[in-house]
Each structure stands twice: as C-alpha cells, then as structure tokens.
Image: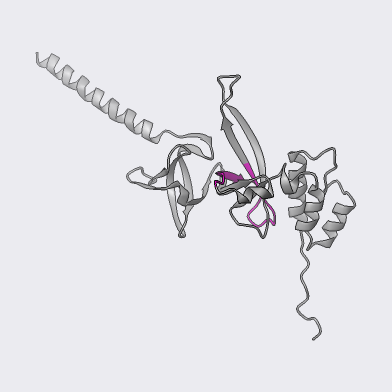
Amino acid sequence: MRTAGFTISTVAVLIALSICFSACTVTRRTSFNSPNDFKNVKSSVELAGNKKFTGYLCFSRNSQTAVMHSLDFSKAINFNQGDILSIKNDLGYFERKTLRSHPADTQHKSARTAFVKRITDEEDFLHLYRHEEVLSNPKSSLPLTTTRYYVAIPGRTKNEVWDIDAGYFDKDFNKTMEVLFAKDQRLVAMIRQKNDKYSVRKFSIRANNKIRVIMNLNKDYSPQTVSSSAAN
C-alpha cells in the first residue's frame, strides 16, 4: 500500500510540475505575425513622455493594452498602446505612423495608424517605411498579406507617412524628388537629365523602382549651405 501511495503521490507531483512547466512555456512562447501583432519578442520601446523600457513585449492590434515582461519574466508592466512611439528589436525598427494616400486625407478625423518598419538609416534625409498587413482572403482559408511603402515628407507633420504609389509620389515622382532634394543642385540636375540612378521612367514607376531611386538619392545627398562669410 505504501508503494502504491508513494507512486500515486509521485505521479501527482509530476503532473503538477508538468502543468506548471506548460504554463511557463505558454507564457514565454514567442510569435510574430506582423509589426502590429506579436508576443514575447525582446524589444526596446519608447513611450510618450520620454519613457523607455526593455523586455519581452506582447502586442496585439486587438487590444488597447501592451504588456512588457522583465528580462527574467519575474515582473510585468502594462501600458496603453497609444503611448508607444517606437519599437526596436531584432526584426527591425518600427514607428507608429498615420498612413496617408492623398493630401485630402488630412481632413479626415478618423486617421488610420499602424506600426511601420523603417527601411532607411536614421541619418538619411528621406525616410522610407514598409507596412505589411494581413487581410482576410475570401477565396482561401489562408490570409492574404499585402505590402505597401510609405515616405515621411520633411517639414510635414512628424507622425505622417505618405503612400509611395499615390498622391505626391504617383505620376510626378521625379518632380517631387527635385523639390525634396532641391538643396543639392547636382542631384537635381541628374534627375532632370533622367539619370537612371536618380529618376524613374514613366513606364517603370513601380514601388521598387521608386525605392531604389530614393535610396540612391539619400546616399549621395549633399546639401549646399550658404557661406557664413558673405559680405556685409
């Protein structure tokens, strides 16, 4: 009987430990579906008010609250998703932006916001962002993922980005680049000469060609400054 009792007790303890271990495993499981839906990804976040935290972040578009676990998972803090300005992790650097397509969009009170991945270096003049969105697919049980690219226009509202295939960057893309990079007349001349490195052709205005041009312009941009020794 003692043997049986010992066996039953041992099994009970093992079951309890198994349940506990499973709970911990579930809690720490990592997943990443999109920049707006992931779980327990080691990240650094910047919040409004110059607050910064580092830990394992749980984040979902379906919740108003984000959860940050400490690095040893012993503590957790909750904060409002609307207070998050940026997220940085091994998957990239993501910023909360208002997505715009046309200038008239600025009149809409219910603006669409999302975390978009910056694909340009921090010091670049013109910043590019990639937005991946998972949509329901009526023709299949598998979700449909779409990718669009956005540009942050210098001098405009800081949190806005503009669709690279619409509005400002649609048919007059080269002219727009002339205006944005106007402080470097050498590059402006190259754009006007339709140099393939710095301009797109009318029949080749797809997003990937625009991205290539912006990357080249950023790399070679050297704005001229007015000499401080001008005659009085």
The image position of residue 161, as x and y in percent, is 64, 49
Q: Is 187 left or right of 37, judged from the image as shown?
A: right
Q: Please indicate, yes or no, whether residue 198 appears anywhere in the rendered image.
A: no
Q: Is 131 left or right of 56, judged from the image as shown?
A: right
Between 195 and 144, the residue placed more toward the observer is 144
Q: Please state the total of marks drawn on the protein image.
A: 0
Residue 118 falls within the magenta-colored stretch: yes
Between 178 and 40, the residue placed more toward the observer is 178
Quadrant containing the C terminus is: bottom right
* Residue beneath the point at 46% across and 52% down: 83
The image position of residue 218, as x and y in percent, is 73, 54
Q: Please indicate, yes or no, whether residue 97 appears anywhere in the rendered image.
A: yes
Q: Quadrant of residue 188?
A: bottom right
Quadrant containing the N terminus is: top left
The image position of residue 80, as x and y in percent, is 42, 48
Residue 201 falls within the magenta-colored stretch: no
* Picture layout, residue 2 above or below residue 33: above
* Picture layout, residue 48 above or below residue 59: below
Q: Is 167 left or right of 178, judged from the image as shown?
A: left
Q: Find the residue positioned furthest to the left.
A: 1
The image position of residue 47, as x and y in percent, is 46, 54
Q: Find the residue positioned furthest to the bottom.
A: 232
* Residue beneath the point at 80% across and 48% down: 172
* Residue beneath the point at 21% across and 25% down: 13
Between 142 and 227, the residue placed more toward the observer is 142
Point out the stretch of residues depicted in magenta: 110-130
The colour mode here is one colour
